[in-house]
Image (tube, rainbow, N blue to C red):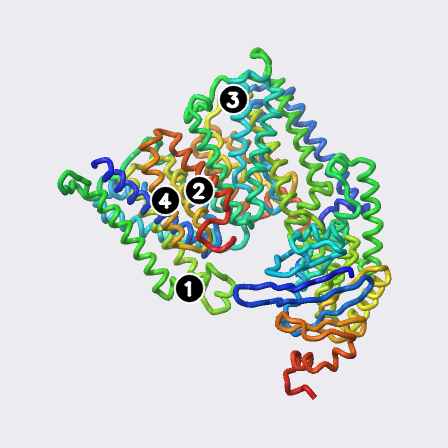
């Protein structure tokens, strides 16, 4: 019973975190038209930044979380203006600049923080008990936070004017421009949100699983899997793919231990990708 | 409207272009001779070691660029290098095959897996193809990592047999890899500048038109991925035998990014681009050896300069200079 | 019959861009296909040349059904086409555009190409010679070393036709060859088309411009994906439905 609850929480938390980061990535992909190779690095920097705020400035974890989210989101604004916008449409240069960002961020983190695993202190102490079942408050809070953000994003995309404009741009960029949508403004907004989400997820995962020098790569692989399986232009697809991936990552290790379980998940996704390279829920590439 | 610079044609030669080709050939022969004679003048084992690695990565970079001729940008290339490396490593270690068998086999296996990926991916358009191949490359390496004893898992594969008997001097390795690299470069060059390459470039420019003149788009896309993978697989195999130890971390996502950097810095539009890019990005940090930890910043800085100021890469410098000079000359009239 | 089309239909969602189209072309004809914008003419071409798959119906070329064939296979069989928006190999020179299009005839094998054998060199020389011939036919031999994307619009269109000729087609589909051209250019192209026809190529020409009609022996008119008239240019010009389709029913005399 213990096992089931633990696995279930794991599924929910992993899924929500994956979806948060994948959504940010998908925003950038659909609205700015870039494959943000640096997204994993931004996620990682978010985690380490949060840690730095807590350790060096003595902020409490909640404040650090909010501040990290806002700071990295602001960095996202700069990235959009100076790194992504000048090269929009030029695939080669976009790849180049993402490589620059990734290398700079990863090297900086490696130098400053070294290579051991660090971890963020928990946000909430204590354990919650119902009968034989106990879950740490931390996990509940993490999941709640994740869900809240996701719901907020869905509301934003489907109910606000800006979200509508985002959807317009992702479907037809030129058409959106012709309709008078300020694509630059919306792109900046998308980048703000995308990077902010990644950073917050970085902090939350940093508390949940710890911070390590490879967490960016780890997350980028997950995000790619989700976005590819989902397909272009679909948000619900990302939710579904993220849930499936979170479930696989939580359940499979119970049966296969160690590296082969990671590999099996990847093998499954590779096969799915070869069957339907354009994704399962989106419109055609 | 700014006129673009003329492209040397594959089939029609005017005497002006012929002269340029002779100039270029002379330049390249000169460079090759210098490189070949280096170990004679610099009797440093360390320099030879660095150059050997450079040669291996040059082949990987050039083969990556060859694939991009067709308009596909595969972000899986380090993964394929890893496939070749592990193939050679495992057949050498577990089956005891000698290097002259393991290296071509690794090339063929990598080619096969590359074409396996190429087949469904050939229908995808640029951005989505890049993303899919990125995932494929990372994914394949993760699968290899999970191979337990057979592949050595996270810690890596050790005990691969060397190319030559243990007591051989480094200089033999140097010339071996120089030779292999030159052969690969020539092979890839011919591939690009014969009609096959022309058809690939046609597909990249307009797949509609290319199909309408009878060029089988899918087939060619898969072909070029196969050829590119063949060579990078052999490069990986060479690396395996040279290093005698393999670690999956050498072929991860960051490794692909580096390869991509080599190509883009040198210039994706020119054949010599990736060669220049590889040399610069490997050799320049060597000058800052004491600041080893910070050398990625230097490379990133170089890449940053290139992306903002000369997006066609460093290989385009002569052309940029030429354009500036003619502009100034015309402005003076 | 060189080309026969039976019941050709293409649905985009609920809209039939081409609806139950029947037509045929005999060897040696010049047939015109006219109709207002959006009538489905380019879709029709796309269906014949394998760029799109038909929802229903058959396309039969020289007795062989080609409805399921891909574009490059259709080209192999001898059907060439130009495109309305005229994409080209922009970074190639004019000469390279045409010589690249000689992919099919003669067809060198990979081995020969890669190892630069005598066969390959002979083929390439042949290609060069004939590419220059075609450029001469369409009047582009003076700009043969210019980059295609730097050419003015009219030249680009001619290049499109030159490219299509390189595959030695038996049937040539021209999609609005004189759209956007000046009067002189139109004369030139019409003469070129006649020369091509004299060399034994069957032509199907899509156009808005009525001047093309004078060239054609037979004209088909389509509107909203359906054939509404067929006959000689004179007959079609007087046809009530045609006039209505183009000008609205106020003009039907």
Q: Residue at x 63, y 20 (%)?
A: B100
Q: Which residue is mark 2?
A: A102
Left or right of C147? Residue C142 is right
Tell us which disc is closer to us: 1 or 2: 1
Instruction: State how far apart marks 4 and 2 are (Cα).
Output: 28 Å
Is the residue at mark 3 from the same chain as the one at mark 2? no
Closer to the N terminus: mark 4 or mark 2? Answer: 2
Q: Which residue is mark 4?
A: A244
- The quadrant of the picture occupied by the C terminus of chain B is bottom right
Q: Which residue is mark 3?
A: B90
- Kind of element beneath mark 2: helix
Q: Quadrant of residue B107?
A: top right
Towards the viewer: C56 or A258: C56
Whether residue B331 can be seen here: no
- Kind of element beneath mark 4: helix
The image position of residue A220, as x and y in percent, is 41, 42
Q: Which residue is mark 1?
A: A165
Q: Residue at x 62, y 43 (%)?
A: B221
Closer to the N terminus: mark 1 or mark 4? Answer: 1
């Amino acid at each position: 019973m213990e096992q089931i609850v633990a696995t279930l929480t794991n599924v929910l938390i992993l899924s929500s975190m994956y979806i948060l980061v994948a959504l940010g990535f998908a925003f950038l992909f659909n609205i700015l038209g870039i494959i943000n190779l640096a997204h994993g690095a931004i996620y990682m920097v978010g985690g380490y930044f949060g840690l730095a705020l807590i350790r060096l400035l003595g902020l409490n974890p909640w404040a650090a979380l909010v501040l990290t989210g806002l700071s990295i989101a602001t960095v996202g604004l700069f990235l959009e203006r100076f790194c992504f916008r000048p090269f929009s449409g030029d695939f080669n240069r976009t790849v180049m600049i993402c490589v620059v960002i990734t290398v700079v961020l990863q090297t900086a983190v490696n130098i400053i923080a070294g290579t051991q695993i660090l971890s963020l202190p928990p946000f909430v102490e204590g354990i919650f008990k119902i009968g034989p079942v106990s879950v740490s408050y931390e996990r509940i809070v993490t999941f709640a936070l994740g869900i809240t953000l996701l719901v907020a994003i869905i509301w934003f995309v489907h109910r606000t004017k800006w979200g509508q404009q985002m959807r317009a741009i992702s479907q037809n960029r030129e058409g959106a421009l012709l309709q008078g949508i300020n694509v630059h403004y919306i792109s900046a907004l998308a980048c703000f949100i995308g990077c902010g989400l990644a950073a917050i997820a970085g902090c939350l995962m940093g508390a949940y699983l710890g911070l390590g020098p490879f967490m960016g790569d780890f997350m980028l692989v997950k995000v790619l899997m989700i976005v590819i399986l989902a397909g272009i232009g679909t948000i619900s697809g990302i939710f579904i793919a993220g849930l499936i991936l979170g479930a696989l990552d939580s359940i499979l290790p119970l049966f296969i231990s160690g590296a082969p379980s990671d590999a099996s998940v990847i093998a499954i996704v590779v096969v799915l990708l070869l069957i339907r390279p354009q994704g399962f829920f989106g419109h055609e590439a | 409207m700014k006129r673009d610079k003329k492209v040397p044609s594959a089939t029609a030669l005017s005497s002006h272009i012929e002269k340029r080709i002779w100039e270029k050939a002379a330049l390249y022969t000169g460079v090759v001779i210098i490189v070949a004679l280096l170990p004679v003048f610099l009797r440093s084992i360390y320099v030879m070691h660095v150059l050997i690695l450079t040669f291996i990565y040059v082949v990987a970079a050039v083969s990556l660029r060859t694939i991009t001729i067709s308009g596909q940008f595969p972000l899986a290339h380090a993964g394929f290098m890893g496939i070749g490396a592990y193939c050679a490593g495992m057949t050498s270690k577990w089956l005891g095959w000698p290097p002259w068998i393991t290296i071509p086999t690794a090339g063929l296996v990598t080619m096969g897996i590359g074409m396996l990926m190429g087949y469904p991916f050939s229908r995808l358009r640029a951005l989505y193809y890049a993303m899919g191949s990125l995932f494929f490359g990372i994914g394949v390496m993760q699968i290899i990592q999970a191979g337990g004893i057979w592949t050595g898992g996270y810690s890596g594969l050790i005990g691969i047999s060397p190319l030559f008997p243990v007591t051989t001097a480094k200089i033999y390795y140097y010339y071996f890899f120089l030779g292999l690299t030159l052969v690969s470069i020539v092979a890839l060059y011919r591939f690009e500048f014969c009609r096959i390459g022309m058809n690939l470039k046609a597909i990249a420019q307009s797949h509609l038109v290319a199909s309408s003149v009878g060029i089988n788009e899918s087939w060619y896309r898969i072909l070029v991925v196969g050829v590119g993978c063949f060579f990078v697989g052999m490069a990986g195999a060479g690396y395996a035998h040279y290093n005698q130890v393999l670690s999956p971390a050498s072929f991860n996502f960051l490794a692909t990014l580096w390869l991509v950097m080599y190509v883009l810095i040198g210039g994706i539009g020119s054949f010599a681009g990736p060669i220049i890019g590889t040399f610069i990005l490997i050799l320049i940090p060597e000058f800052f050896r004491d600041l080893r930890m910070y050398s990625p910043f230097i490379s990133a800085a170089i890449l940053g300069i290139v992306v903002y100021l000369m997006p066609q890469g460093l290989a385009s410098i002569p052309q940029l200079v030429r354009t500036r000079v003619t502009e100034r000359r015309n402005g003076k009239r | 019959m060189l080309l026969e089309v039976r019941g050709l239909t293409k649905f985009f969602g609920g809209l039939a861009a081409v609806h139950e189209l029947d037509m045929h072309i005999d060897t040696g004809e010049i047939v015109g296909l006219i109709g207002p914008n959006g009538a489905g003419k380019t879709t029709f071409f796309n269906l014949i040349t394998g760029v799109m798959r038909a929802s229903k119906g058959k396309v039969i070329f020289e007795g062989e059904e080609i409805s399921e064939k891909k574009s490059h296979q259709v080209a192999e069989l001898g059907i060439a086409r130009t495109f309305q928006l005229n994409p080209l190999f922009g970074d190639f020179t004019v000469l390279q555009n045409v010589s690249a299009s000689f992919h099919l005839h003669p067809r060198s094998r990979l081995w020969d190409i890669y190892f630069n054998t005598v066969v390959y060199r002979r083929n390439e020389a042949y290609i060069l010679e004939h590419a220059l011939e075609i450029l001469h036919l369409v009047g582009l031999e003076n700009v043969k070393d210019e980059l295609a994307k730097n050419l003015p619009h009219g030249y680009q269109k001619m290049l499109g036709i030159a490219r299509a000729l390189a595959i030695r087609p038996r049937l040539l589909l021209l999609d609005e060859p004189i759209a956007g051209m000046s009067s002189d250019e139109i004369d030139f192209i019409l003469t070129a088309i006649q020369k091509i026809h004299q060399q034994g190529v069957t032509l199907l020409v899509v156009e808005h411009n009525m001047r093309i009609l004078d060239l054609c022996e037979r004209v088909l008119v389509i509107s909203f994906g359906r054939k509404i008239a067929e006959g000689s240019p004179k007959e079609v010009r007087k046809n009530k439905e045609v006039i209505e389709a183009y000008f609205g029913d106020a003009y039907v005399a």
